[in-house]
Amino acid sequence: MREFDYTVTDVLGIHARPAGLLSKEAKKFSSTIMIYANGKSAKATALMKIMALGVKNGDTVHVTTEGYDEEPACIALKKFFEMNL
């Protein structure tokens, strides 16, 4: 399992557009990718669950990847967060 923490800097937090892009990025990998925030968790491929986390600007999310391609998945998701959120 690989993991990282990221503090969201987008002024709107994780809203519909970036959540959709995040879900699309996560679907490229076979590993299970989970996002934890505000005492809740969601699979990164589940758009509505991601939005239900209620992540706002300044919130820290914890992301885990587990499976066959966990290393490239972790690297790609960390880059996605840095570039989009």
Image (cartoon, rainbow, N blue to C red):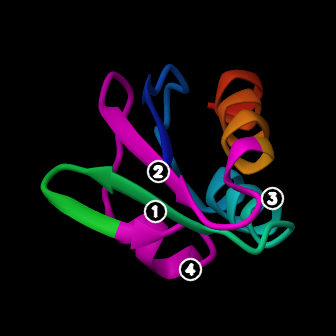
CA gap, disc 3 to disc 1?
A: 13 Å
Above or below — where is 63 with respect to 11?
below
Amino acid at the residue labelled 4: Ala
Picture disc at residue 78: none
Residue at 75 percent of width and 28 percent of height: 79
The amino acid type found where label 1 is placed reads Met
Tell which tag, 4 or 1, sits nearer the viewer.
1
Residue of label 4: 46
State the residue position of label 2.
64
Q: Residue at x 39, y 70 (%)?
A: 42
Where residue 48 appears, as percent x and y from the top left, is 49, 80
Q: Which residue is mark 1?
A: 34
The segment highlighted magenta reads 42-71
Mark 4 or mark 2: whose residue is earlier in sequence: 4
Q: Position of residue 44 (x, y in %)?
A: 56, 66
Q: Which residue is mark 3?
A: 25
